[in-house]
Amino acid sequence: MSELKKIREEQNLTQEELAGKSGISVRTIQRIEAGADPKGYTLKNLASSLNITEKELLARDIQAEIKIQAEEPFFTGEKEESVNYTWVKMINISSLPFAWLPVANFLLPLLVMFFTKQNSSIAKQIISLQIFLAVISPVIFMIVALLKLGSKAVLMTMILLTLSNIYIILRNAYEIDRKQKLFYKLNFSII
């Protein structure tokens, strides 16, 4: 929480009331409460409207920043991954040509991952998901075949498994593009 917001709430003022009292726009107060630093005229008017000194308003912000930095670990020991999301998306999309053949749907992405040296956790998660689908799809297909529901049910199962794999690949590609993360992923990694 920003210091301006704390002081404003301590004095039981709304943003609109503080704006009227200080002559500063509500939008400017919102920006400052979101993290922008008050300066010059804005700083003077806010401090006088809140009956505090400019140094108090700024000192509180500095103290809060120092406290936050002190709480953060200096070195976590974990190495940050550098991820090339274009290649990650290509690894994901490379599953499409073999989406209809569950046994091979992870081979091309695996080769792309090794040749491009994209060993990030997201790339491994994409391949783990395709390996999982390569294992589970034949099991589902065999269950439907053993239940002797007819050739139409077997064909529909095969089509639905293929379409669901294509949907998973395309949905993950969309999320990689938008948010740099996967929409469908496993809670574990196979590779």
Image (cartoon, helix red, strand yellow):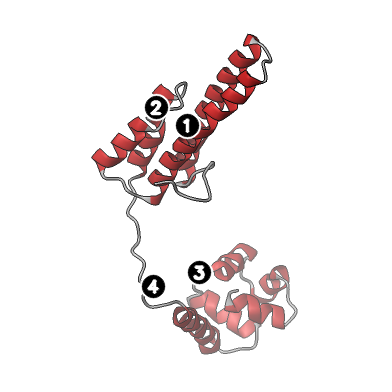
Residue 80: image location, x then y, percent = 35, 61
In the rendered image, is residue 102 in sight? yes
Q: Secondary structure at mark 3?
A: loop
For label 1, the crowd category at 10 Å Cα-Cα, with few meaning under 14, some 14 to 19 and many 20 or more, is some
Looking at numbered disc 2 in the image, what kind of residue is underneath it? Ala
Kind of element beneath mark 1: helix
* Residue 135 horizontal/vertical position (percent): 49, 33
Q: Give the Cα separation between the discs numbered 2 and 3.
A: 53 Å
Question: Mark 4 and 3 residues: CB-CB less than 8 Å, in contact?
Answer: no
User: Nearest the camera: 142 or 47?
Assistant: 142
The answer to whether the residue labelled 2 contacts the one labelled 4, judged by CB atoms less than 8 Å apart, is: no
Q: Residue furthest left?
A: 115
Residue 166 percent location from the top left of the image: 50, 26
Question: Residue 126's image quarter?
Answer: top left
Examine the rendering and report whether any part of residue 167 can be seen: no
**Mark 3: amino acid:** Ala
Q: Mark 4 — residue?
A: 76
Which residue does the image show at 33% across and 64% down from the upper left? 79
Residue 104's label in the rendered image is: 2
Q: The N terminus lies in which quarter of the figure?
A: bottom right
Within-10-Å neighbours for mark 4: few <14, some 14–19, many 20+: few
Point out which mark residue 134 bears.
1
User: What's the CA distance linking mark 1 and mark 4?
Assistant: 37 Å
In depth, the one of 76 and 165 nearer the eye is 165
Q: Residue at x 47, y 31 (%)?
A: 134
Task: For marks 2 and 4, give the CA distance.
Answer: 39 Å
Q: Which circle, 1 or 3, is nearer the viewer?
A: 1
- Closer to the N terminus: mark 2 or mark 3? 3
User: Nearer the observer, disc 2 or disc 4?
Assistant: 2
- Residue for point 53% across, 78% down: 43
Q: Which residue is mark 3?
A: 36
